[in-house]
């Protein structure tokens, strides 16, 4: 497999050069990425949560952002919409996204040093999981968490909530599921990223236009 080449930056988000992802992770170079959180308004307003593939090198089987990925070398932030189509089969026009700004992600996982400028967006979607075409290599499932339940969960009001969606079984076949999840099922992060995203989703649904990460 050809290694993915990405741009890397200084601490002020100014491009410095290009390198393979292995180098950027080994040396902790700043890269940039695209995060799109999708809020479904069909039925009970819910956040779409991707279940990462069990074959992922980092955080397999964890729940995370609806669609996300590194921007490749030369790509502008607007080009990140390709991640939405590649991962979940949803064609989205960049101008339809709601920009929440840039989140700085920093973490060390084993020998991997992660430093990212994450460009974060919200997208209001009037469909649900049945309208998606999920990438069976990148994802092992897609779940829907009602926005109200997400607020309760990540504020610590409740220890777990019920979600529904689809997941792959041991034979790789998609099937409907309903289950309980807790914050331990998500990628661990230093900041309350998930809580902030459910707050933004709730504000969006209530017509508030001043949104930011």
Image: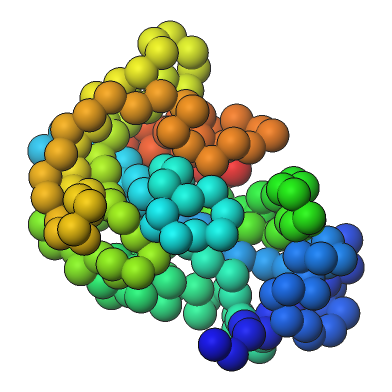
Q: Residue at x 73, y 73 (%)?
A: 22
Quadrant placement of the C terminus? top right
Query: Residue 95, position in %: x, y?
Result: 41, 70
Query: Residue 51, position in %: x, y?
Result: 36, 49
Quadrant placement of the N terminus? bottom right
Q: Residue at x 74, y 49 (%)?
A: 110
Q: Which residue is drawn at 30% across and 69% down?
A: 135
Left or right side of 154 for 31: right
Q: In which quarter of the image is residue 71?
A: bottom right
- The answer to which of 10 and 62 lies nearer the viewer is 62
Left or right side of 205 for 113: right
**Above-or-below relation of 95 to 40:** below
Q: Residue at x 28, y 34 (%)?
A: 145
Q: Which residue in the rendered view is the most extreme toward the front?
A: 171
Q: Quadrant of residue 189?
A: top right
Count numbered badges in the picture: 0
**Above-or-below relation of 161 to 173:** above
Q: Which residue in the rendered view is the most extreme toward the top?
A: 157
- The answer to which of 136 and 149 lies nearer the viewer is 136
**Above-or-below relation of 160 to 71:** above
**Visible in this render: residue 41?**
no
The way the protein has been coloured in the rendering is rainbow
Query: Residue 169, position in %: x, y?
Result: 20, 51
**Visible in this render: residue 60?**
yes
């Amino acid at each position: 497999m050809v290694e993915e080449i990405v741009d890397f930056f200084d601490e002020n988000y100014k491009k410095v050069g290009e390198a393979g992802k292995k180098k950027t992770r080994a040396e902790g170079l700043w890269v940039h990425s695209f995060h799109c959180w999708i809020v479904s308004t069909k039925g009970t307003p819910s956040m779409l949560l991707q279940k990462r593939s069990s074959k992922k090198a980092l955080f397999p089987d964890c729940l995370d952002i609806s669609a996300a990925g590194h921007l490749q070398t030369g790509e502008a932030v607007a080009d990140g919409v390709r991640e939405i189509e590649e991962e979940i089969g949803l064609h989205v026009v960049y101008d339809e996204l709601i920009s929440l700004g840039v989140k700085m992600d920093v973490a060390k996982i084993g020998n991997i040093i992660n430093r990212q400028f994450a460009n974060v967006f919200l997208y209001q979607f009037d469909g649900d999981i049945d309208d998606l075409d999920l990438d069976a290599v990148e994802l092992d499932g897609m779940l829907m968490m009602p926005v109200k339940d997400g607020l309760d969960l990540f504020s610590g009001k409740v220890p777990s909530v019920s979600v529904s969606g689809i997941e792959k079984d041991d034979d790789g076949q998609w099937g409907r599921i309903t289950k309980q999840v807790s914050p331990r099922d998500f990628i661990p992060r230093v900041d309350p990223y998930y809580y902030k995203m459910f707050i933004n989703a709730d504000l969006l649904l209530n017509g508030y236009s001043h949104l930011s990460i």
